[in-house]
Structure formats: structure tokens, C-alpha cells
Image (spheres, coloured by chain):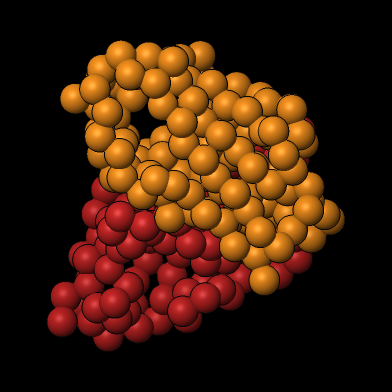
């Protein structure tokens, strides 16, 4: 079966520090991968998605970047965190194929920028 | 532009009563519609989807949803609510474009009182 991992689970970082959040998927090949941010426990904002290694699409211009160095690894980064980067970050995957449309989410990383 | 609206921030229902969580959408072309549920400090879990076919779709935990093309709605329903159904529910629409991006509604918090 497929599994998605995210780490760390929680993170407290000072303003101006770098960020690296990692997401890995097991049990599938060539998934579509997504990074979302959820603010204040409500709506999800799509940040980045990837349809393959090295292919990143950015949805919202901001202080973050994403990379996909391996098929099942998706990394969210920042060189200098802002207070507004605080939130709950969710990684998700979708199997590519004719009948696979839903996304499956990781447990999330709660980031607090102080 | 594609969008999803969940008109109720919160729905309150007594245990054993039927529940409805409303969702309307705006999308060009045929919609791919989803419901997800989120428990506190967790990632989203897929509940059910409408892709094509029967307008009434059944999903996990006894939930179902009805696709209504003329009203562009996809309301989530359950005949008899449980206290354990209390959570945050998201309606979503996916675009059959590169990356199969998904747009989420703002979420509806469901409270089921014993």
C-alpha cells in the first residue's frame, strides 16, 4: 500500500532563517506531488505541484521554492523565513492514471516563525 | 475562473439526525468533484468523488454526495450523524489539466452534539 511521510511534524524557526520540509511517498511510481499551506485551520492554498522529477509549477509567487530531486521526494524550501510563512504545510500525492483523481495527504508540518 | 464555495462556516446537528454540508462550484467543462475530511492537526482524508455516471455517490463512513449539474452543487450528506463525524469538511474541484490541480473550498466545520 501507499504511504506518505512528512517531516518534521512541528518546527519553530526565527525570522530570516532557512527552511527545508521534506515529503516522501512509498508504494507508487511517478506520482503527481503537491505542497499546500493551510492558514488558521481553514482553506488550503496550493503552493507548488510537480508532475515529474525536476518539474515544478509554482502557483503563488512568494518566499518559498520547491524541488523534486527524486521520483517520490518533494522538498519545500526557503532561504529566509518571514512571519507570514507560519502555517500548516501539507504534502499530497496523486497516482497518475485514468481512474485516479483523488489526492492523498501527509500528516502535515506545523511551522511557527517567531 | 474555477471556484468552490462552501456557504456555511459551521453546521450543527444532533447525533442521529441527518446532516448536509453544502458545496457549489464553478468550473469550465466537466467537473471532477471531491469531499475531504480533516480532523484536528491532521492531514486531509479523501471521502468520496464524482467523476461521471450516477449522480449519487457513496463514500467512506456512510457519507454520500449528490451531484446536481443544473444547480452546480455537490452537497455532502449522511442519514444519521455521529459525534465522531465532528470535523472540518472540504469540498474540492479538480481541473483536468497538467498536474490535475485541485481547488479547495474554505471548509465547513461540522459539530455533532450528543
Q: Which part of the image, by quadrant, shows the N terminus of chain B?
A: top right
The answer to whether residue B25 is seen in the rendering is no
The residue positioned 54% from the left and 21% from the top of the image is A65
As rendered, which of A46 and A91 lies closer to the eye?
A91
Residue B77 visible (yes or no): yes
Tell me what residue is drawn at x 41 percent, y 76 percent.
Answer: B78
Query: Hue of chain A?
Result: orange
Q: Percent from the top left, x then y, of residue B40?
A: 28, 58
Q: Quadrant of residue A102?
A: bottom right
Whole-percent x, y for residue B39 in the image: 33, 62
Q: Is residue B46 above or below residue A68?
A: below
Q: Quadrant of residue A37?
A: top left
Q: Position of residue B36 (x, y in %)?
A: 48, 58
The one nearer the camera, A84 or A21, is A21
Residue drawn at x 84%, y 56% is A98
**What is chain B's hue in the picture?**
red
Front one among A101 and A15? A15
Amino acid at each position: 500500500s501507499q504511504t506518505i511521510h512528512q517531516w518534521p511534524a512541528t518546527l519553530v524557526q526565527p525570522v530570516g532563517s532557512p527552511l527545508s520540509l521534506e515529503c516522501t511517498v512509498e508504494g507508487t511510481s511517478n506520482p503527481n506531488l503537491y505542497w499546500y499551506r493551510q492558514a488558521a485551520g481553514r482553506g488550503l492554498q496550493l503552493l507548488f505541484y510537480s508532475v515529474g522529477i525536476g518539474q515544478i509549477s509554482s502557483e503563488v509567487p512568494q518566499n518559498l521554492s520547491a524541488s523534486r530531486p527524486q521520483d517520490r521526494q518533494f522538498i519545500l524550501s526557503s532561504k529566509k523565513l518571514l512571519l507570514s510563512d507560519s502555517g500548516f504545510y501539507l504534502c499530497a500525492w496523486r497516482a497518475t492514471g485514468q481512474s485516479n483523481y483523488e489526492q492523498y495527504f501527509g500528516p502535515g508540518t506545523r511551522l511557527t516563525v517567531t | 475562473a474555477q471556484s468552490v464555495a462552501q456557504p456555511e462556516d459551521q453546521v450543527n446537528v444532533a447525533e442521529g439526525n441527518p446532516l448536509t454540508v453544502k458545496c457549489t462550484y464553478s468550473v469550465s467543462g466537466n467537473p471532477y468533484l471531491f469531499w475531504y475530511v480533516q480532523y484536528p492537526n491532521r492531514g486531509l482524508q479523501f471521502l468520496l468523488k464524482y467523476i461521471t455516471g450516477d449522480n449519487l455517490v457513496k463514500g467512506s463512513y456512510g457519507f454520500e454526495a449528490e451531484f446536481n449539474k443544473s444547480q452546480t452543487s455537490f452537497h455532502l450528506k449522511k442519514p444519521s450523524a455521529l459525534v465522531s463525524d465532528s470535523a472540518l469538511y472540504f469540498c474540492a474541484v479538480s481541473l483536468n489539466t497538467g498536474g490535475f490541480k485541485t481547488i479547495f473550498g474554505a471548509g465547513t466545520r461540522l459539530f455533532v452534539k450528543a
